[in-house]
Amino acid sequence: MLFLTYLINGISLGSVYAIIALGYTMVYGIAKMLNFAHGDVIMIGAYIIFFMIYKFNLPILLSIIISILICLLLGIIIERLAYKPLRKASSLSVLITAIGVSYLLQNLAQLFWTSSNKIFPNIISNGSFSFGSISISYLTIITILVCLLIMLVLTLFVNKTKIGMAMRAVSEDKDAARLMGINVDRTISITFAIGSGLAAIASALFCAAYPAVYPTLGSMPGIKAFTAAVFGGIGSIPGALVGGIMLGIIETLSKAYISTQLSDAIVFAILIIVLLIKPTGLLGRKVNEKV
Amino acid sequence: MKKFSMKKLFSFLFNRKHSNMTISYGIVVLMYLIIEVLIKTNNLSYLLTSLLVPTCCYIIVALALNLVVGFSGDLSLGHAAFMGIGAFVGSAISNYVYSLVPNIALRVIVAILAGSIISGIFGYLISIPVLKLSGDYLAIVTLAFCQIVKSLLNNIYLGFDDSGIHFSFINQNFTLDGGKMLINGPVGSTGNTKFSNFTVAIIMVLFTLFIVFNLINSKYGRAIKASRDNKIAASSIGIDVIKAKTLCFVVSSILAGGAGALYALNYTTLSVAKFDFNLSIMILVYVVLGGLGNIPGTIVATTILVLLPELLRSLSDYRMIAYALVLIMIMLISNNETIKNSFNSLIGIFKRKDQNNA
Amino acid sequence: MPEKKLVLQANKLGIDFGGLTAVNNFNFKIYEGEICGLIGPNGAGKTTIFNLLTKVYEASRGEIVLNDKVLSKVSTFEVNKLGIARTFQNIRLFNQMSVEENVLTAMNNDTDYSLFDSFFRTKKFYDQENQKHEKAMELLRIFNLDKDADSLASSLPYGGQRRLEIARALATNPSLLLLDEPAAGMNESETLELMNTIKKVRDTFNIAILLIEHDMKFVMGICERITVLNYGQILAVGTPEEIKNNPKVIEAYLGGA
């Protein structure tokens, strides 16, 4: 029974990874870049929720919504100022710029809010459901539900709406999409906005589970979620869900049954093995070079 | 006997094939001379003096990484791991042989050699899965490797006393009777005798340049570059792409390991946390700013970027923000079409002048 | 006249991609010193045959015999060592290397100094490097590229890039040279020059050459034997004269009107 509890906790942690991984995967799909600053948007999101609740005494839900909106805007601004001028540059130049943006956000946070931990407010009540001998906290359940809801909405959005179709077209072939009258720049902006908004949601859920806010908060979940995105096949939305949840389960189970200290090593070793068997991730598409 | 003439030497040093080499060795020797003069005349601050050896180590790792990223064309985010392996092997060996080998020079050589070799072995092992992949997938596997090494190093407990070597994993399950802890889990390695010698570090940099240039300017280097430029064409002319890339990756990991050992000897304490993903990124920044495949550029960029945060010290709290902004601005400016074009036409004017003179 | 040596033989070669049969029942022979053409409408499977011969793709059926030996499952780079070199439809040069380096790289398997020699710059290293330099320049001279030896491969004009690709392939000492649309994008005088160069290459090195080309003047003017491919199958084989007058070929090219 204990196993089942671990499994559900793993799915919950994995749900947070999946939400963050979506940001990586969507941006990668459309702009073909690894947005290393994505993890730091999570950190900014967490600080905003913290200040909205403690400084301005706003209700929890409103604070989260404000955080989502600000992160959304931040995503658009970062894309406009730092990435858009590099559309034609080499992918390494874009990567270094993203690293620069990441340093900038971390150090701005440190300057304004110092490097000391801030205790994140309790946004979800502590109770839990019991099913027989298993008890599952409200937080766990809410996290999983939020993740599933986001996946559902996003899948519908990408497949059924005009903007969603534009996104798919741009990720397939930018030039062809432009010729078909799609506003490529706006589509990329929207993708960044969605990814960053999701990062804000993830920050609420992540900090509810690990209630400490500090400037480098985003690094570790960022790397893990990035790994999850690759795990599932980067560029694929269902891949992000599968990769995130797999990663969450592996991490939780190896912490429970093997070793807490070695869980990271195990997660990354499994990633390497998966990529050896399926070089483009679990749900990634294989692209053959035409000779 | 060939007759020696200044003119011949000059044309040998600065012809198209050798100018990069001459400039690289020249920069390093010049830097050494300037700094030695500054030290002798007491014009170098304590802080900058303490940064000399680490700067050399970063130059070596950056050159090593440029082999992989610039010449082999594969993005590695794992070079901090090789540096870390070299550092802990090097410090453990130098501590272990401390009483056996009283000669400090010999001890340093043994430590650096051991660090290089072990790191090279790991480089070979990880290259097997890494080089089966390409592009961003290759990058993520090197990143994963970096995290695994850090995680493993964090859990190694290694010590020795009169009864021999003790080793345990995850938890320390031995006590030492006298003796010394070589690696103490997340605490790392402490209470080491510091060996900090700028001349040795510069010699290591020169040696690295020697290895890099002699590798690149040979059939092996051509195979590596060809595999970068076009894998399919390279195999069509009989080049074993995987073999070429493996050689490059292994040489790179050996050099990075040696630099790690040299780095470790420069400190009395060494923690595992230092060798994480952020260090990999930092070195990558040096390489990209120095220019892919550009060796003198890598040396200059690394030196400036290691010292930049120190030079920006007057900005106090704002210095890391300034650093980040400098990074972003360099990328934006160097990729700006208008600036690039005007720069190229400027070079064009000079080139034309040259031809008119000739 | 003595019998000419058989260089390559393909027996009932075929490959399927998923459910699609791209090439089927491809039988082919080519002898030393022969220039053969492979023509056919777009999508007929010409380049696929090149990819099968060089093991970029592994054939689903049939066998390839090269210099009396059956080609088993080997990698592309090993096929080159066994004697097949090729060019590509979309030029594939080592763009960031010099013209000379492009050719030098192709001589790697013929250069046997070790890693030790290159690190310590032994006499063996310098001797072999100088020797290969001479040989590379000689090859470049045939293709009129010797003056550009030090420029970047990517800086060559289009025709020059096509010629460099052939020079690079030749540098591997092949017994069979596969040329994928060597005259594509060239003007009339360049095409004419290329025809003469290819003939010269055949005469100097006495190798077999198989080429894919859409320029009929070129094919008819240079090939001794032509194989016509349609929908992955051989439609006709013959001398240029026979192919020109073959009603099946005319129909395949002009459509069944």
Image (cartoon, coloured by chain):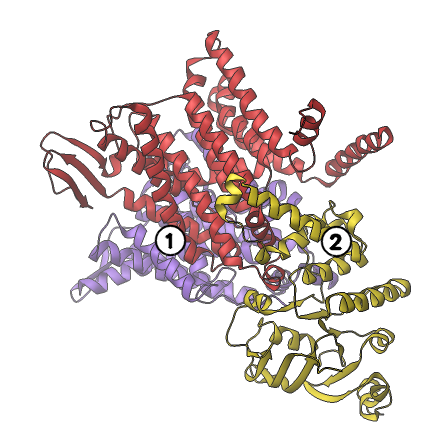
Element at badge 1? helix
Determine whether, in the image, residue A80 is placed left or right of residue B44: right
Which quadrant of the view contains residue B80?
top left
Q: Which color was chain B given?
A: red
Q: Which mark is residue C138?
A: 2
Q: Nearer the viewer, mark 1 or mark 2?
A: 2
In the displayed structure image, the side of residue B225 where residue A133 appears, left or right: left
Q: Is residue A125 above or below residue A179?
A: above
Q: Position of residue A75 (x, y in %)?
A: 55, 46
State the residue lying farthest toward the front: B1
Q: Quadrant of the C terminus of chain A?
A: bottom right
Chain A, chosen colour in render? purple
Q: Is residue B178 left or right of residue C93?
A: left
Residue B125: give its label: 1
Q: Chain of mark 2?
A: C
Q: Amino acid at mark 1?
A: Leu
Q: Residue at x 70, y 86 (%)?
A: C231
In this picture, residue C160 sits left or right of residue A31: right
- The kind of residue on which mark 2 rests is Glu
Label 1 neighbourhood size at 10 Å, few (<14), some (14-19), many (20+)? few
Q: What letter labels the chain drawn in yellow? A: C
Q: Quadrant of the N terminus of chain A?
A: bottom left
Mark 1–mark 2 Cα distance, whole angstroms, equals 42 Å
* Residue, far right: C189
- Asked if A135 appears above or below B102 in the picture, the reply is below
What's the chain of the residue with tag 1? B
